[in-house]
Amino acid sequence: MTIWQIFQGLYTLFISEPSIAIARVLLILLGFLLIYLGYKKVLEGLIMIPMGIGMIGVNAGVLVLEAAQVGNLFVDPMISDPTTLMNALQINFLQPIYNFTFSNGLIACLVFMGIGAMTDIDYLIAKPMPSMMLAIAAELGSIATFPIAMALGLNPGEAASIAIIGGADGPMVLFTSLRLAQHLFVPIAIIGYIYLSLTYAGYPYLIKLLIPKKLQGTRMDLREIPRTPRPQKFAFAIAACSILCLLFPAAAPLFAAFFVGLAIKESDMPRYLEFLTGPLLYGSTFFLGFVLGSLLSADVILNPKVLMLLFLGMIAILLSGIGGLAGGLLAYKLSKGKINPLIGIAGVSCVPTTAKVAQKCAFLADKKAMILPFAMGPNVAGVITTAIISGIYITAVPLVIPLLTP
């Protein structure tokens, strides 16, 4: 035994293949970068700080295990043998959280409960058609990226999983990739969350490029948003949940989770609401970032498909932004200037980030432009449309694969 073997994190850098060692060092540095950007609030700190620490831990903390096998004590997503799994649950740090909340999609549902409990649906109920139309326009990336990914050589499950990034809904990306491309769900989910965090910084530039400044400051009449009674909003939550689960059962867990959160909000139960929007949402989001970061080891990032996934994820989120703004411009024309076109970008359903982007850009153009309450309509509708598309992909892709197999 040498001194290097005592410090096995360093030792395994030298006994690994050069590509693995270099990838580990790069991922450690990337972890530091994500932590810094989260700390400075350039990216979402609640996700990026634990994700960065997880990436550093899993790539720095590599040691020699049984039979000279190199690994870590964080999590092994590929274990399926019951005996081995029971052993891993007792040894690997995050294995219980992964197996009991990630592998079955529970973590995505828990986050959705919290999102539902903090969602305002007044404008969606007041103006359901404009909200849904803008949300559909903002699904351009979720739909158009699928054939692009297929043309670049991805199979239907992989193509659907990366395309759903266009919906800008992290739990949905996680849920879909776990169902259709489990072997790639780690890079897809991480790419999705990084791009989703970048929407707050990146979409304003897209708005400046596509929307004239005069239109950005279009004022909207707040009197057009009626105060919807709680019983009506509660009834909407129950009815929408029932109908959507009946039509798209593959996404029923996500619908049920979102609408139960919304129902609790409109039932005026403050203690339960505090639990859903506080400990549940923030705890789930924290462990979501931590476990994802801990799954991003060097062998995952060296998958040759990762660069293609990075490109396709960027295409998906860009096309959805363009589609949303195009829908916003159409709404502006049809309403004869009464609808601010920026609310179209809120149809990209990163709740409430894209709605805040719309308000931020409108405020910069006109200090009296208040559009956030209107932007929440397509923002919430975008959650529904993305879940619908996810349900269609999860249902249809397994039926398509046999037809494409020689």
Image (cartoon, rainbow, N blue to C red):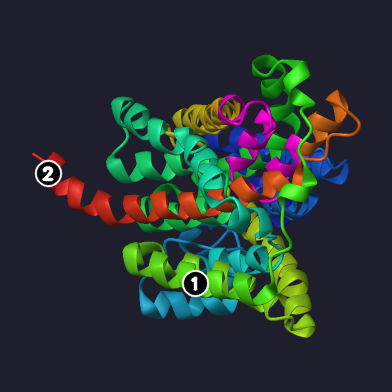
Q: Which residues are magenta?
A: 331-358
- Could you say where residue 26 lies in the image, as x and y percent from the top left? 67, 34
Residue 277 left/right relative to 312: right
| Residue 258, percent from left and from top | 56, 67
The CA distance from mark 1 to mark 2 is 32 Å
Q: Quick one: label 1 or label 2, which is nearer the N terminus?
A: 1
What label sits on residue 256 in the rendered view? 1
Residue 46 is left or right of residue 159, and the answer is: right
Q: Nearer the viewer, residue 246 or 317?
A: 246
347, 2: nearer the viewer: 347
Q: Label 1 amino acid?
A: Ala
Residue 341 on the magenta segment:
yes
- Quadrant (top left/top right/bottom left/bottom right) for the N terminus: bottom right
In the rendered structure, are the residues bearing label 1 and label 2 in contact, judged by CB atoms less than 8 Å apart?
A: no
- Name the residue at 49% across, 78% down: 87
> Is residue 10 something that shows in the picture?
no
- How packed mark 2 is, by other alpha carbons closer than 10 Å (few <14, some 14-19, many 20 or more), is few
| Magenta-drawn stretch, dominant element (helix, strand or loop) | helix
The residue identified by callout 2 is 403
Residue 112 in the magenta stretch? The answer is no
Helix, strand or loop status at disc 1: helix
- The structure residue drawn at horizontal position 58% and vertical position 48%, both measured from the top left corner, is 296
Measured from the top left, where is residue 285 in percent x and y? 68, 61
